[in-house]
Amino acid sequence: MKEINNLTVKYHDRLVGILAETKEGKGAFQYDREWLEEGFSINPLSLPLETKVFLPKTDALEGLFGVFADSLPDGWGRLLVDRMLLSRGRIPAEVRPVQRLGIVGSTGMGALEYYPELMQLGEREQIDFDQISGECRKILNEEESENLDTLFMLGGSSGGARPKVLISVNGESWIVKFPSSYDRRTIGEEEYRYMECARKCGIAVPEVRLFPSEKGKGYFGVKRFDRASSGRIHMITASGLLETSHRIPNLDYNDLMKLIYILTKDNRELEEMYRRMCFNVYAHNRDDHSKNFSYLYNEKEKRWVLSPAYDLTYSNSIGGEHATCVNGNGRDPGIKDLLEVGVRAGIPENKARQIAENIEETVITELKDILNSYK
């Protein structure tokens, strides 16, 4: 794997700009001249369409702008990349972020691609999920796996803590997850039920399914919403927009409500975020960090929208609290906190209360047995 210190950033085969590593180890970025005339801001908060060299103002995201840090794998994907590097005699800590983006190449989340590509990743059609799950367990248990290259090819560009693979199903891109070392063996079915419950709560969710297993009730799969028949869709997380690490619980839902309104100026998007907050509170989804909220850019309509919901499970963050506070309350937020966030965002109190109560009732009806099983 050759050493590089600058990358060409592309979107749909169009040159967006150049990302280069400075002597201080930061990722400097400059838009291409044609992109400035015909493109869009890939991060409207920190990378406006201007003729200048942009330098990150923080080291919170490994010296990168958030939109590029979003492309880097973390959790499971980072573990696979590090294992792959070690197998090739490289010390992972010495591989810099720009180099890691070269490993991601054209396979990252969203639509940005990085060249030159240093590795070849991809999707595969038919695979044995039980076999892949077993190999994932070996990696998590720090055992040797003869299929490391296959796991890396299928999941090396992914984010999130749980093992996963990126596959093609009938020509469509899907993500299939496997239990982590701390998950219950029924986690696939649980996440499927959470997503279906969220759908019944009026929350926008992608297509999901349980892929078959001979050792359990199945593996959770979700159709990728950053891929479409028209091409890849530009995506950025709240972490990327705000240039803050998702590992630091420093956000409140009041912040997310402000952010979505700044991006969209659409009250329907505010209500959608409010529904997700209510769902996360009542369904005990407390791993609601800044990378679990994403925004998609519709280039044709020149507007941002909230992405479909994802990573909805029974979970806790640091200290058992919500990663994102609800009106300053991370430990035990209730209807009072939910209403204050909603009203502050401009949602009439009676409507905010009705939404919250309907979601609470739906969650109790659909997920009561799962919630009780964790007590």
Image: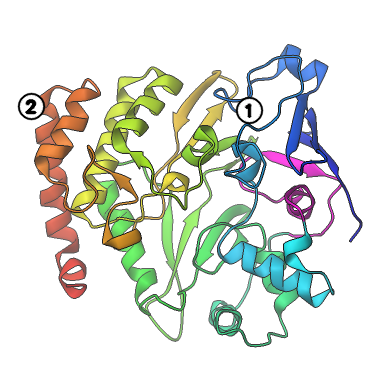
Identify residue for label 1.
42
Relative placement, left or right, of 55 versus 6 is left
Give the amino acid at mark 2: Asn
Give the secondary structure at mark 2.
helix
Q: Quadrant of residue 5?
A: top right
Q: Is residue 276 above or below residue 271?
A: below
Q: Is residue 112 magenta?
A: yes
Res 170 label: none
Relative placement, left or right, of 283 versus 126 is left
Q: Quadrant of the C terminus?
A: bottom left
- In this view, the residue in front, 94 or 307, is 94
Residue 3 % position (x, y)? 90, 54
- In this view, the residue in front, 48 or 280, is 48
Residue displayed at 77% across by 34% down: 10
Q: Quadrant of residue 328?
A: top left
Residue displayed at 70% across by 19% down: 39
Which region of the structure is painted magenta? 96-121
| Residue reaching furthest to the front | 24
Q: Is residue 58 above or below residue 2?
A: above
Identify residue for label 2.
350
Q: Quadrant of the N terminus?
A: bottom right
Q: Quadrant of residue 95?
A: bottom right
Q: Is residue 16 magenta?
A: no
Label 1 vs label 2: CA separation? 37 Å
Give the amino acid at mark 1: Ile
Residue 305 % position (x, y)? 45, 29
Q: Residues within 10 Å of mark 1 (few under 14, many from 20)?
A: many
Residue 71 % position (x, y)? 64, 46
Residue 354 % position (x, y)? 10, 34
Give the secondary structure at mark 1.
loop
